[in-house]
Amino acid sequence: MRKLLVPLVSTIVMLAILISLGIWQLERRAWKAGLLAQIDTAEQLPAIALPDVPGSFQKVRLEGHWRTDSEGLYAFEVRDQLPGAHLIVPLERAGQPTVLVDLGFVPDRMARPIALATASVEGFIRPAEQAGMFSSGDDVANRHFYTLDPARIGKALGLGEVAPYTLIALGPVVRGQYPEPAHALPRPPNDHLNYALTWFGFALTLSVIFVLYARKALRA
C-alpha cells in the first residue's frame, strides 16, 4: 500500500483541482445566462437618450450633424461574396464631444460619401480598442482603420474632441441596402457547460487511470 501513497495523494490533489474548475465553469454558465437574459430584456426596451456615462448592453439614441466629409472605414469583411468594411461617420453634437458612429458594412465598390437622410441614430456603445502586437496597421492616408480607437481615428480624420467610445448603429437589415447596420445587441457566447464537462471528463479519466494503476500495483 505504501507504493500507492504518492500516486493516491497526487490523484486526489489533481481531482480536487479538476472538479473545482468544472464547478467554476458551471457558476460562470449561470452568470452568463443571467447576462444574456439582461441583454434580451434591454433589447426589447426603447432606446434612451445617450447618457453622460453610457452603460453596457444598453440601446441609446443620438442626434446631431453628420460629418460625411470626414468619414472613414474600419476593419475588413466579406459579406455575400462582397469585400468591404464598416463605415465610420462622425456625428457632431452642439457643445458635446463628437461621436464616431459605425453605420455598418459597406462593399468596396460602393461610392462614397453616402447621403444620410437623418441626423439621428440608435445603437449601442462599444468601448475603445487598443492595438495589439498582431493588429494590422491603420491606413491613415486612405482613412482605413483596423483598431477601433476613437482618439486615434478622430485625430486622423481631423476632428476635435471625440467621445472615448464608438456607437454601433442598430437597424433592420435589408438585403442589398447599405450601410448594413447591426441588427441586435452583442451577445457573448455561453459555452461554459462544454468547458465544465471537459474538466469533469478529465477528472473521470484520471480516476479510471488511477484505479487501473492501483489494481496492477496491488497484484504485483
Image (spheres, rainbow, N blue to C red):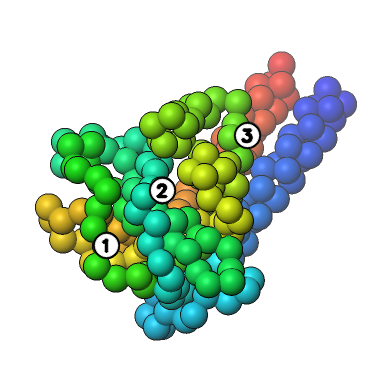
User: What is the crowding at mark 1: few (fewer than 14 residues within 10 Å), some, or many (at least 20)?
Assistant: few
Closest to the observer, 72 or 202: 72
On the image, numbered disc 2 is attached to which residue? 70
| Residue 139 makes an appearance in the image | yes
On the image, numbered disc 3 is attached to which residue? 206
Closest to the observer, 13 or 8: 13
In what element is the residue under mark 2? helix
How far apart, in angstroms, are the residues tagged by discs 3 and 2?
60 Å
Closest to the observer, 148 or 151: 151
Contact, mark 1 vs mark 3 (Cβ under 8 Å): no
| Residue 33 makes an appearance in the image | no
Q: What's the residue type where badge 3 is placed? A: Leu
Q: What's the residue type where badge 2 is placed? A: Ser
How far apart, in angstroms, are the residues tagged by discs 2 and 1?
13 Å
Q: Closer to us: mark 3 or mark 2?
A: 2
On the image, numbered disc 1 is attached to which residue? 116
